[in-house]
Structures are given as C-alpha cells and as structure tokens.
Amino acid sequence: MKKTLVILTRNPLSLIGLILVGIVVLSALFADVITPFPAHVGAVVDFANFNQPPHWPNIFGTDLVGRDLFTRVVYAYRISLILGIVVLAIAVPIGVAIGLAAGYLGGWTEYLLMRLTDVFLSIPPLVLAMSIMGLLQPTLTNGMIAVTAMWWPWYTRLVYNIARSEKEEGYVLAAEVIGASKLHIMFREILPNCVPSIITKMTLDFGFVILIASSLSFLGLGVQPPTPDLGSMVAEGAKYLPDSWWLTVFPGLAILIAVFGFNLIGDALREILGVDQ
Amino acid sequence: MSTLLSVKNVSKRFEVNGRTVQALEDVSFEVERGECLAIVGESGSGKSTIANIILGIYGPTDGDLVFKDEALPAKRTQELRRAIQLVQQNPLSSLNPRRSIGASLRLALDVHAIGDRTERDQRTGELLEEVGLPAEFRTRLPASLSGGQRQRVAIARALACQSELVVLDEPTSALDVLVQARVLRLLKSLKEARGLTYVFITHDLSVVRNIADRVAVFEKGRLIELATTKAIFTRPENPYTRRLIGAVPVVSAQEAALKDNIMEQENGNA
C-alpha cells in the first residue's frame, strides 16, 4: 500500500491525479473552513449582489440570487463525494458477491445470475436511472439508489470473469481436495486475487459516478434546490450563456477536475497493480 | 500387507461436444498400505483420470472404489477428504499467490479441526520443518519461494490433515533435475516416517525406478500391465511397456554404472 503511494507520486501524470483528487477531497472535508459564506449553501437571497462576475470576495462570482458560487461549488463536492462513496460502498459488495457466486459455482446459479446481470446491463444506464428516479421522488437518497442499481452489474461482470479463470488454478483444486467450504473458496481464496482489479475499477468509477450523478441532476432528477449540486448548477447556468459564463464554467471545471483526477489515479493503479483491461 | 484402496472395474466416459470419449475402460487394481504404486503412461492414457476419481473430483461412470474396506462414494465426506490428499504437478499454481504459506497450510488444520486453535500457527511451522523448510516461511508469500520450495509446501499441505493416501500427480515434472532428486528423497523419507501410501502418477520412468514399489502401466484408458518395479524394468511382458522403457534415453553401460554408483552415494548421504 505504501509502496503503491510512492510509485504514484513518481509518475508525473499520476502525481497530477493525486493532487487533483487531494484538492477535491480536502475541499470537501474542510468546506466549512475554506468557504467565505457557508450560509449560502441554503436558501439565502442577496439581491444586491446577484449575478456578479468573479471579484473579491466572490472569486467564482455570484449566482442569480446573489449566493457565492465558490462556496456552493465546494459544498457540492462534499455531496458528490458522499454520493460516490455510498454508491460504490453498496454497489461493489453486491456486484462482487454475485460475480463470485456465478463464476465459481457455475451451473444454474451462473446462468440465472448472469442473465439477471445482462438484463441490467442491456438498459442504457441513464435511462435506467431516470426511470427509477421518475418512479421515486427526485432526492439525494433516491439518486444514490438509482446510480447503485445501474452500477453493480459492472462489478459482477468484472469479478465473474476473474473468478472463472481463477477457478481453474491449482490452489482452488487444492482447497477443494482439502474440503474447504464454497464460501471459503469464494471469499478467502478467489476474492483476494480479484482485489487489484476491483480497486482499480473503483478508482476509475469514482469519477464516473460523480459524472453520472451530475448528469442526472442536470436533467433535473438529482439533488433538489437549494442543496448545491454541480450538475444542476451547470444546467441552471447554461440558460445564461455566454453572458454569465461563470455560472457554468466553474461548476463544469469542478466536475472535470474530479473526474480527471480519479481517472489518472485509476489508470496509474491499473499499471502498478498489473491489472489487465 | 493389507489393501488400502481397491479400484474395481472402473470405467469413465466423458461427453465432449456430443462425442463420447472413453477415458478409462474396466480398470482394476489394488493399492497396498505403505506402498508406492506408480501409474505410468503417455498423455491421454487415463492416468490423470484415475487420479481424479481416487480424489473424488468426479465419480466413475461404472465400477466401484473401496477404501479401508468401505465403499468410496463420489461425494466425499470430510473424513474421506482428510484421508486422501493430493500433490499437484505445478507448484506455481497450487499455492494461492495472495495468501501466506502459513494461511495455506492452516486451512487444512482449520477445515479438519486438527489440534488446538491456538496451537495451529505453531503447527504450520512444524509442518514446514518436517519438509525441510524453516518455520519462518509461514509468513511469506509463495512468490518469494523457489519451485522446489513451493513443492515442499504443497507436500506439507497434503500431510497437514494427517492423510493416509497421497496422490502425487507428476509432483516432480515441473522441477529441475537436482531439485527433483531432493523432492523424491523427501517423499521417500516422509513415506517411511509417517507410514504413508502413495499413488504416484508420472510419465518419467527414471523417477519410477527411484521411488515406486510397483508400477501400473496405462495405455489408452486400459491397465495393460501391473508388476513390481523390478519386474517391469527387467522383464516387461507387454510390448507397449517394452516400448515405453525402450524410449528412455540411455547412456552406455559403463556410464550407467558410474551414474548408479553416484546415485547410491547420494542416497546414502540423504
């Protein structure tokens, strides 16, 4: 783990990734301290200052009701990160467990589980998320449910393929001959050999989860006002382009930094951990 | 000597792409307690199929197996799994690359509840020492061990559950010659020390000569000759056996005598 971090800082690209992700994570963690107007996260109105271009102290400018845009972007990171963590924390264990079971047990279990996975994979992700959000109320929690529902099958696919090839390895046969339980073989023997691939995919996906959540809120199906959200900020600001450019550019850049940073680290991890695509 | 395992009229057919392949045809033999029975034959002769049937990886299509005077079902009980163990050909894949040597050995102890829970870690160290490796190796990963060392670990694992019959599936064919000789010596001494019985699958006749008490020759799924090692090498009855022995590269009689002499010294030193 320590070794991996050292290697990450040596490569210029992954170092940039680390710095970008560091900025995102730190600003989300210390949002209360670094933002000048924490109160602007909520339903605050300051019409004296509305729709101002970047100036001191509103370095990203102000939005249509006079709230500080920098404050709102930083707080939006916090929500994006929570969403990413929650989605992956639920989707990954589910996807991995199903993939392991399908790959190792084979037979009817494999057939049923993989066809179920195919059904989920065959629906375009955004359509699936939109229909779930349409059925439920568009809230942060339901957004997480929707994104989780579209995310787990990718982990099932990934782990299923690894498990199928690891199953042929001698150590699995050895454990079977000894009489180890199926659960032991799946989770203690095969799973450790999937971990590098899973970690790499999670790092890459973190950016994509943020992106898809932003897309959902861009469509008006994500986090609802007044809670700040990068996707809805871009959607709102796009109506006032190009005059009030800061309304879209800063939230857009914020999405870019997060997605790009996580992708750079993910790519570097893939090479360091020797994961095949 | 009493019989440990008998194989009675065992046949095995596989369905491959709608075609039926007869892997074993009416094979019968007995394995005596404490002996090393070598099963030799070329690729596709069915020698691995019989090993898998003995291990319970799959059942026979026809025929029965009897182990310690009781029928040996295809679906094994934990007790039967404990008693019949395996050493695989490839020591690179037989140990989990992401689990420590100790964890791999401990699995056998945990599954069969051998020894006190708190003493099992220490027990893995003793097992390593028994196969000539330092006990500290238990914290290492397989990647830091050589092929021969890994094969010793695999042997230790097969012994960990106090097995009685060990199926050795070409255990030395992936090793270089010197390591091969050392592993064979280890197998020999363990067999005596623990009173083990071996079924030794191999295609290497020089290995057979070194360790086996009796030899079973397989050709195309049939057992064509079964005799003591000495008899097989001095007066093979079946023409196929003769060809198999004839295929072993030999040196001149003088060189052979020299080699035998050296080997005896080696074995004496062991």
Image: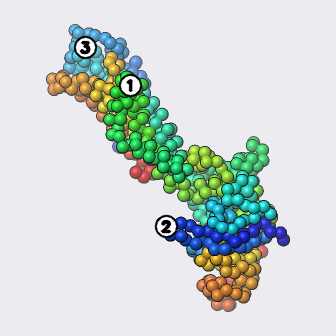
Q: Chain of mark 3?
A: A
Residue at point 25% right, 18% down?
A63
Q: Picture quarter containing residue B85?
A: bottom right
Which amino acid does the dot numbered 2 rest on?
Gly
Residue at point 63% right, 60% down?
B57
Question: B249 left or right of A276?
Answer: right
Residue located beneath label 3 in the image: A65
Question: B250 left or right of A264?
Answer: right
Residue located beneath label 2 in the image: B18
In the picture as drawn, the residue positioned furthest to the left comes out as A243
Residue depth check, mark 3 versus mark 2: number of the one nearer the observer: 2
Residue at point 50% right, 53% down?
A164
Which amino acid does the dot numbered 3 rest on?
Val
Which amino acid does the dot numbered 1 rest on?
Leu
- Where residue A10 appears, as percent x and y from the top left, is 41, 44
Residue depth check, mark 1 versus mark 3: number of the one nearer the observer: 1
Helix, strand or loop status at disc 1 = loop
Residue at point 71% right, 47% down?
B110
Q: Check residue A136 in the rendering and tell me which mark sits there, or answer none.
A: 1
Tally the numbered discs: 3
- Where residue B174 appears, as percent x and y from the top left, is 59, 68
